[in-house]
Each structure stands twice: as C-alpha cells, then as structure tokens.
Amino acid sequence: MEKLKALVCGASQGIGEATAKHLAAAGVQVFALARSQEKLERLVRELPGGSQAGHRAVVQDLGDLVGLKNQITKLMAEVGPIQILVNNSGGPKAGPLLEADDGEFLKGFTEHVLVSQNLAKLLVPGMKAQNHGRIINVISTSVKVPIPNLGVSNTIRAAMGSWAKTLSQELGAYGITVNNILPGYTMTPRLDSLRKATAEKLKISEADVEKNWKSQTPTGKFCTPEEVAAAIGFLAIGASSAITGINLPVDGGRTPVL
C-alpha cells in the first residue's frame, strides 16, 4: 500500500494538533482540518517535511456541511483515497440540560454526528477499495458516565458512541475499524474554558476546581494531548486490526466503571 494518508479534524490545537504531529512523525501524510488558516499553516510547517512531504492545511468550518463536502471531495480528487479519519471537534456549551435551547442540540449534532457521517460517506469507498481503513472518534468519558453540567455534550457524545458502534459492525468485513477515544481531563483550551465556567458557577477559584478534578483521578494529574494522541496513533497505525467498536478511555483512570 502507498503511504498512509490521514484527515485529522480539529487540528489547529489540543488533541487534534497533537494527533497530527504524532501521525506525521510516524510517516503518515496529514491533512489538518480546522477553521484557523494561520494556526493550520503553522502546524504544517512544524510537521516533518512540511508541505514538501505532502502535509496540507484544510481550512473549513465543521458547521458548514456543504462546504465540508466540497472541500473533501476536491481534496480526494487531488490526492486519492484517505485511509485514516480522525473525527474531533470542540464540545458543546456547558450547562444543565433544561437550560439548553434547541440550537445548542442542533449545533452539537451537526458538528459531531453529521460531520462524522458525511466524512465517512466520502472516505469509506476509498477505504473499501483498499480493504483498509481506520476511523477514530475523539469523544468523551461521558459515553460511559455522564458528566455533571454537560447536558448537551453528554447527549451528543452518547449519540456519537452509538453511531460508531453501528458503523463498526457495518464495515468490519472490509478491513475498516471504527473506534472511540474517550479523553478525561486533558490539558487543552476546552479544559481551560470548563474550569473557568465551573469556578464561576461554584463561586470558587480555578485552582480549587483543578485540585478537585485531580483528586478524582487515580494518577492525580491531567492527561496531555500527546498522551491522547499516542492512543489514537495506536488505533490508526498500530497493530490494532482486530480492535473495532470499542471505547478506549484515556483518562488517568478517572472513569469509575469498567
């Protein structure tokens, strides 16, 4: 098989950026997708070989499904099949379920489930033709245990989990695996915003919020984006062909269920 290619969503920062770097370091040609052209262009320059190695920025808002479809259709016409898809998008707004409006649910469903569905429909035919594909979804430990004050996120993440499990059953015979990575507390801009919102809601300091969160984790620390990216890399390019349809927590042991 030719050099593996990966489409990494949400690649301008956090877990997506770390994943792009991890895969590129392993010899994968990376197409980094996000809204920020400046951040993506910087990322491409930092990847091994840069644009000369075929790495490319794909500037696209995941909320625009038509634009997304057009962008990826054009990309694949130029570069051919893409064997690795990393679905990754920022989480929905925090807050209790009954304080959320319909728009928050629709936005979350679009940017997570519908984006993943549309990308799979575009990429899977090429994966089937090569009898090889890897779809990895970055979701949340809330798939296993709902997280307080993340009502919309818990709902959307659960939908993503069921979508992925169903897809894994449909695609297993074609050499395509579908798995979910469930990050716990991870040092990303998303965690920063949640920590700030929690501190304001509870009227305590952000330092106290962080101390409380770390106390809930057996390792006593937050995960790094690089640690999550390593797990994604294993599922994407490691000896993982027999692993499909699973939820893999990368959370320092925080999730209180098997």
Image: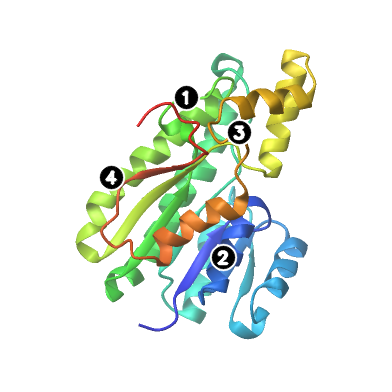
Seen at 57% across and 69% down, the residue is 31
Residue 174 drawn at (x, y percent): 23, 65
Seen at 47% across and 24% down, the residue is 146
Q: Amino acid at mark 2?
A: His
The crowding category of the residue bearing disc 3, from other C-alpha atoms within 10 Å (few below 14, some 14 to 19, many at least 20), is some
Task: Give the alpha-carbon distance from disc 4 to disc 2, as whole Å.
Answer: 28 Å
Q: Are marks 3 and 4 in contact (CB under 8 Å)?
A: no
Precedes in sequence: disc 1 or disc 2: 2
Residue that badge 2 annotates: 22
192 lies above or below 245: above
**On-image quarter of the C terminus:** top left
Colour scheme shown: rainbow
Precedes in sequence: disc 3 or disc 2: 2
Q: Are marks 1 and 3 in contact (CB under 8 Å)?
A: no
Q: Amino acid at mark 3?
A: Gly
Q: Which mark is residue 146?
A: 1
The residue mark sitting in front, 1 or 3, is 3
